[in-house]
Image (cartoon, rainbow, N blue to C red):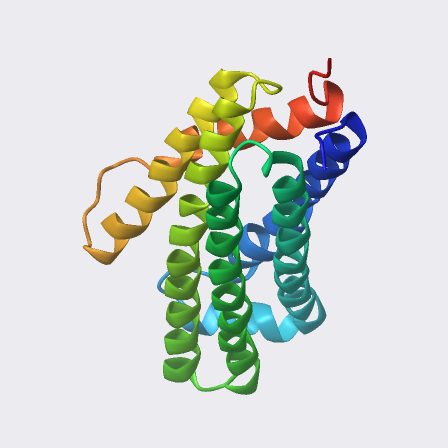
Amino acid sequence: MKPTNKLARQSGFLYFLLIPFGVFGILYIPMQFIVTDDINATMSNIAADEFTFRLGIVSALVTQLIQILVVLALYQLLKSVNKKVAVLMVVSILVAVPIAMLNEVNYFAVLASLGNGERVALFLELHEYGVIIAQIFWGVWLFPLGYLVYKSGFIPKIIGVLLMIACFGYVIDSFMIFLDVDMGIVLSEFTFVGELALVLWLLIKGVKTT
């Protein structure tokens, strides 16, 4: 299949959907419910609004389903550039998705353990590390994606470069946490711009066609 504006905008729209679902399930829920160093307050927050907490789990799961659709759409868009690299891009996401989905089991365990502070704290910590493990692959897939964009000729090369930089942002952040090294900065908070640029380009500009 040759790259078309219709396919580009479909890919961009699906990629855009990751933002609201991902932000709600992966970022908002921990910020809303988890109180650092106060497990009793955390359990009280969850017990007081269990439905929203469960909604966050569902949102995180939906995010991963959308991620599959995103990578398959981008595969169709970019496979003509280099099919082997496009396959590597798909494989990277297909590794991340089951890790991220199974990680939500920890949140269900939190719900089942309310009232037992030690168990709740353990499952919350396991969930946090599960997200960080998945984040490695959320970073890795951006390198082949960035390479394909850079080589495509129908999406600006600078977006490809920014995507490859974003890869290292996520991966370095993950391993610094595992090594218990505080850099004083979260790289991915700055390097994610490549993803945003790609989404906007695909939605607004599509692809250059001749």
Residue 22, horizontal then vertical, whole percent: 61, 50
Residue 199, horizontal then vertical, whole percent: 64, 30
Quarter of the rendering containing residue 189: top left
**Marker count (numbered):** 0
Judge whether residue 170 can be spotted in this image.
yes
Furthest toward the top, the residue is 210
x 52%, y 73%: residue: 102
Furthest toward the right, the residue is 6
x 48%, y 17%: residue: 158
Left or right: residue 56 versus residue 27 is right
- In the figure, 110 relative to 136: above or below? below
Q: Nearer the viewer, residue 98 or 156?
A: 156
Residue 148, horizontal then vertical, whole percent: 50, 31
Residue 129, horizontal then vertical, whole percent: 37, 64
Left or right: residue 92 versus residue 184 is right
- In the figure, 117 relative to 70: above or below? below
Q: Nearer the viewer, residue 172 or 69?
A: 69
Q: Quadrant of the N terminus?
A: top right
- In the figure, 68 relative to 203: above or below? below
Q: Quadrant of the C terminus?
A: top right
x 45%, y 74%: residue: 40
Judge whether residue 31 can be spotted in this image.
no
